[in-house]
Amino acid sequence: MAKWLVLLGLVAASVALGYGYLGPESCQGCHPDAYAAWRATPHARAKESLSAAQQKDARCLSCHSPAEGEQQVANVTCESCHGGGQYYSARYVMKDAELARLVGLVDPSEKGCRTCHDASSPSLKPFDFVAKLKAIDHWSVERKKREEGGADKADKPADSSKDKGEKK
Ligand code: HEC
Ligand code: HEC
Ligand code: HEC
Ligand code: HEC
C-alpha cells in the first residue's frame, strides 16, 4: 500500500509542476508520422485495457492514463513523455531546440520509462530499455524525412558538383 501512495505522490507532483497539456491531436498536424506510429502502440490505448471500474481507480490511472485528472488527456500520450506542450509547440519555439527545452520540452529518458515500467507493472520480464525503445519507434520516419530534404533543406542545391569542387 505504501508503494502505491509514493507512486501516486510522484505522479501528482510531476503533473502539478508540469506545463499544460494540449493533447496528442495538437501534435498531429506537424508530426503526422510520429502520431501515426504512436497510435499503433499500446500507449495510445492504455486506458482501454482497464475495465470501467478500473478506469476510475487512481492506482491504475497513474500509469495507464496519468494526465487525466489534472489535464484531461487520456492514455499515455506524447506529453506523458515529452512534457506538456503549452509553451513549446509553437513552430518558432519548436525550431529552436534550446528554447523548446527551456519552456517544457523533455528529452524522454530510460528513467522516465521506468516510472511506469517498474516492479509494479504486470510484466514478468525486467524492462529491456533498448528493445522496448525500438518497439515504440516514431522518430526514424521523422528523421528520414528531414534528411531526404524537409522544408528546411528544400532550397539547397541537390547536385554534388560542390563536393567535387572542394576536393580540387
Ligand atoms: C506548429 C507545428 C508543430 C507542432 C504543433 C508541434 N511541433 Fe514538434 N516540432 C515542430 C518542428 C518544426 C520541429 C523541428 C524539426 C526540425 O528542426 O527539423 C519540431 C521538433 C520536435 C521535437 C524534436 C525536438 C528536438 O530538438 O529534438 C519533438 C520531440 C517534438 N517536436 C514533439 C512535439 C510534441 C510532443 C508536440 C505536441 C505537444 C509537438 N511537437 C507539436 C513543429 C511542431
Ligand atoms: C512512451 C514515451 C513517448 C511517447 C508516448 C511519445 N514519444 Fe516521442 N519520443 C520518445 C523518445 C524516447 C524519443 C527519442 C528516441 C531516440 O532519440 O532514440 C522520441 C522522439 C520523438 C521525436 C523525434 C525527435 C527528433 O529527433 O527528430 C518526435 C518528433 C516525437 N518524439 C514526437 C512525438 C509525438 C508527436 C508523440 C505523440 C503522438 C510522441 N512523440 C509520443 C518517447 C515518446
Ligand atoms: C506514464 C506511464 C508510462 C511511461 C512513462 C512509459 N510507458 Fe510504456 N506502457 C505503459 C503502459 C500502461 C503500457 C501498457 C499499455 C496497455 O496495453 O494497456 C505500456 C506499454 C508499453 C509497451 C508495449 C508492451 C510491452 O511491454 O512490450 C512498450 C514497448 C512500451 N510501453 C515502451 C515504453 C518506453 C520505451 C518508454 C520510455 C521511452 C515507456 N514505455 C514509457 C506506461 C508507460
Ligand atoms: C506502475 C505502473 C502501472 C500501474 C500502477 C498499473 N499498470 Fe497495468 N500495465 C503497466 C505496464 C507498463 C503494462 C505493459 C507492460 C507490462 O506487461 O509490464 C501494463 C499492462 C496492463 C494490462 C495488460 C494490457 C494488455 O493488453 O496486455 C492490464 C490489463 C493492466 N495493465 C491493468 C492494470 C490495472 C487493472 C491496474 C490497477 C490495479 C494497473 N494495470 C496498474 C503499468 C502499470
Image: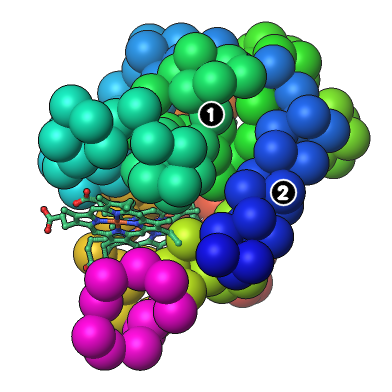
User: At which x and y percent is residue 149?
Assistant: 41, 35
Lateral position of residue 143 relative to residue 108, left or right: left
User: At which x and y percent is residue 141?
Assistant: 29, 46
Q: Can residue 99 be seen here? A: yes
Lateral position of residue 87 relative to residue 1, left or right: right
Front: mark 2 or 1:
2
User: At which x and y percent is residue 60?
Assistant: 38, 46
Q: Can residue 143 be seen here? A: no
- Report how far apart the C-alphas of labels 2 and 1 lie in the structure: 13 Å
- Which amino acid is tagged 2? Gly
Q: Quadrant of residue 108?
A: bottom right
Report the front residue among 6 and 112.
Answer: 6
Picture layout, residue 167 above or below residue 166: below
Residue under pointer 1:
67
Report the front residue among 22 and 90.
Answer: 22
Query: For residue 122: magenta?
Result: yes
Report the front residue among 64 and 82.
Answer: 64
> Magenta segment, which residues?
119-129
Picture layout, residue 113 above or below residue 123: above
Query: For residue 113: magenta?
Result: no
Q: Which residue sits at x=65%, y=26%? A: 84
Kind of element beneath mark 2? helix
Picture layout, residue 100 above or below residue 24: below
Kind of element beneath mark 1? loop
Residue under pointer 2:
9
Q: Residues within 10 Å of mark 1 (few under 14, many from 20)?
A: many
Q: Which residue sits at x=20%, y=47%? A: 42
How many marks overall?
Answer: 2
- Which amino acid is tagged 1? Ala
Quarter that holds the C terminus: bottom right
Quarter that holds the N terminus: bottom right
